[in-house]
Image: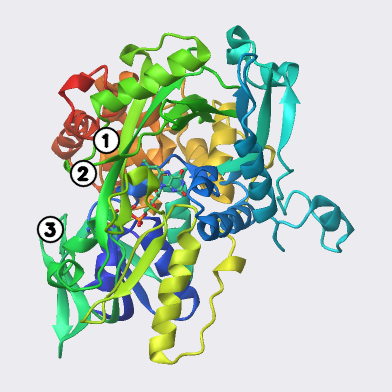
Amino acid sequence: MLSRTAAIEAIAGQHFEVVVIGGGITGAGVALDAASRGYSVALLERGDYAEGTSSRSSKMVHGGLRYLQNLDLGLVREALLERQLMVQLAPHLVYPTPFLVPAFPDERRQRGLGIGLNMYDVMATTRVGRSRREMRSSKDADEDYYWSPDRHRTIDRDEVLQMVPALESRDPKNAYLFYDCQTDDVRLTLTVLGEAERFGAVMLNGAEVTEVLERGGRAAGVACVEAGSGERLEVTADNVINATGVFADRIRPEETIEEEDVPRISPSRGTHVLVARERLSTGSAACIVPAGEGRAIFALPWYGRTLIGTTDNDFEGDIDHPRPGGEDVAYLLDAVNEFFGVSLGAGDLVGAYAGVRPLIATGDPKKSVDISRRAELYETSSGMLTITGGKLTTWRRMAKQTVDRLVEREGREAPCHTAEIPLGMEARPEDLEAPDGVGEKALEQLAFRYGHAARQVLDLTREDPKLAEPIVPGRPDLLAEAVIAARHEQARTVADVLLRRTRLGLLAAPQLRDDGPARAVASALGGELGWSRREVKRAAEAWPAAAAEAGIDPAGSPVESLQ
Ligand SMILES: Cc1cc2nc3c(=O)[nH]c(=O)nc-3n(C[C@H](O)[C@H](O)[C@H](O)COP(=O)(O)OP(=O)(O)OC[C@H]3O[C@@H](n4cnc5c(N)ncnc54)[C@H](O)[C@@H]3O)c2cc1C
């Protein structure tokens, strides 16, 4: 990615064919789609890339078995097709995980679930995800490249316990086994942005759009405030795309709120918590956990921790800084405690976070759990296009739908290419050469997170062995990643590195109470960005407030006091 200084220069006072507001997965997707069809594109993000909902998802690239219950078949089918495509386009970053639905001796088998899983299997059949037999007989068969999930099946007690030893005390009878995929949502967003830049898009974070410029009643660009200087920059554009997710109706509210036929955004909060695997391990599989009233949550392996989520409740609090709710944390812990027969408390959490879904209210009084995850694209009177709702999984479809509309209204001939554009470049850990001091875990994580670009991180550790040190003792994230974040990913703050470029804020929050990691990261950032010693100190000192604002450490700041 261009440095911020270069991006400001490339954007300020310039004209583009498309300006995108919002640097979450949707905005990133629109930038990639438009740029790869030949449009000149600028993207502006007010905070950090993926700082909104796109860093706060459940990290699943999935069809959403749950949405079958609502008979949202189109959405599930679409998401399943995208799931398969994402494994193909970003094999280092999107990976299949076995999901188990265990059954216990005193329980009746859930027949409805079996039917649902059959539908899930059938709906996942694609040209991309052709059956394995078909793939093997095809000329370009390469099983590593084309992932196609096995059909769901029932596994017996022994296999369940082999996969999820934590269920031993519950003595499971058997389990349904099916597959979905996982990722790192921020990395996916950054990777898509990186590809967009390869096609010529220019992006800038710390650039809050405060005004949509108008010419003859038509949206003709935007004005934004650049965070570093406080200066107002203008960017003129033929087309303005509002991809600000749950904040979409703040952009030109006279259009996005007041015009008739414009869908209403109805925020819903989802809380997640993470615990060490020593306290609760689901092995390499995910488990669906009943949580009362017909609801289910999941416990899944993620970056060597167990991620537990999620809640889904209408939310009227501060959508700019959603934090895990105390009651939600208790609800999640109660459900896993009962299911696995453990006794986890707030003191066991290594991290927590909450996100707000940009759900589209339909006018009928459904609870947010039942509201569709469909995307909405709408054009308001100035010609501005707003794309919101949807899912992390369906970003590419949402982007295509948006740019198709542009192409159509301009009468261009410009087909979409994103189904064929690889996202980053795959590298396997064994392809990477480890310098002294860089262990196997770090290599694995670097290959997952950066793909081929992991080599740049490793080169830095060769130039300066101090950068091979972990940011947090015992975790595989390297100090060199803070340097890469500043040099190539426009990171500006310690929180950018600890919450998003690495995910240490979610994986090791209690260890970040100590000021050592924040100081090390601030100093690495300062070295790249030319900060004075005072600026480095100030950056490190800003971390505790950022951590509290995100609510990542409920035991450090008691959950009861949180909203
Ligand atoms: C709890 C939870 C769990 C989820 N789990 C999953 C899952 O497992 N799988 C899945 O597929 N989907 C999941 N989703 C849905 C998915 O995360 C979202 O649909 C997706 O991230 C939305 O992306 P977005 O880019 O539209 O919005 P955002 O990521 O919120 O991006 C909008 C961006 O716009 C920026 N912005 C706002 N105002 C301005 C302005 N004035 N100027 C410039 N920039 C601005 C914001 O800072 C933000 O970065 C989940 C959602 C939640 C809340």
Which residue appears at 55% of the width and 44% of the height?
65
Q: What amino acid is at disc 1?
A: Ala
**Position of 548 compared to 415: left or right?**
left
The residue under label 3 is: 229
Which residue appears at 31% of the width and 53% of the height?
358
Q: Whole-percent x and y of residue 14?
A: 25, 79
Q: Where 376 falls versus 106 (above or below)?
A: below
Mark toward the start of the polypeptide (1 vs 2): 1
**Position of 518 compared to 56: left or right?**
left
Mark toward the start of the polypeptide (1 vs 3): 3
Q: In which quarter of the image is the N terminus?
A: bottom left
| Spatial separation of the CA atoms under disc 1 and disc 3 | 20 Å
Q: Whole-percent x and y of residue 563?
A: 18, 31
Q: Where 501 falls versus 439 (above or below)?
A: below
* Residue placed furthest toward the right: 137
**Position of 128 compared to 70: left or right?**
right
Query: Do labels 3 and 2 touch, CB within 8 Å?
Result: no
The residue under label 2 is: 531
Query: Do labels 1 and 2 touch, CB within 8 Å?
Result: yes
* Residue neighbourhood size for the residue with mark 2, other residues' Cα within 10 Å, grouped as few (<14), some (14–19), many (≥20): some
Q: Where 219 falls versus 546 (above or below)?
A: below
The residue under label 1 is: 522
Q: Where 462 falls versus 92 (above or below)?
A: above
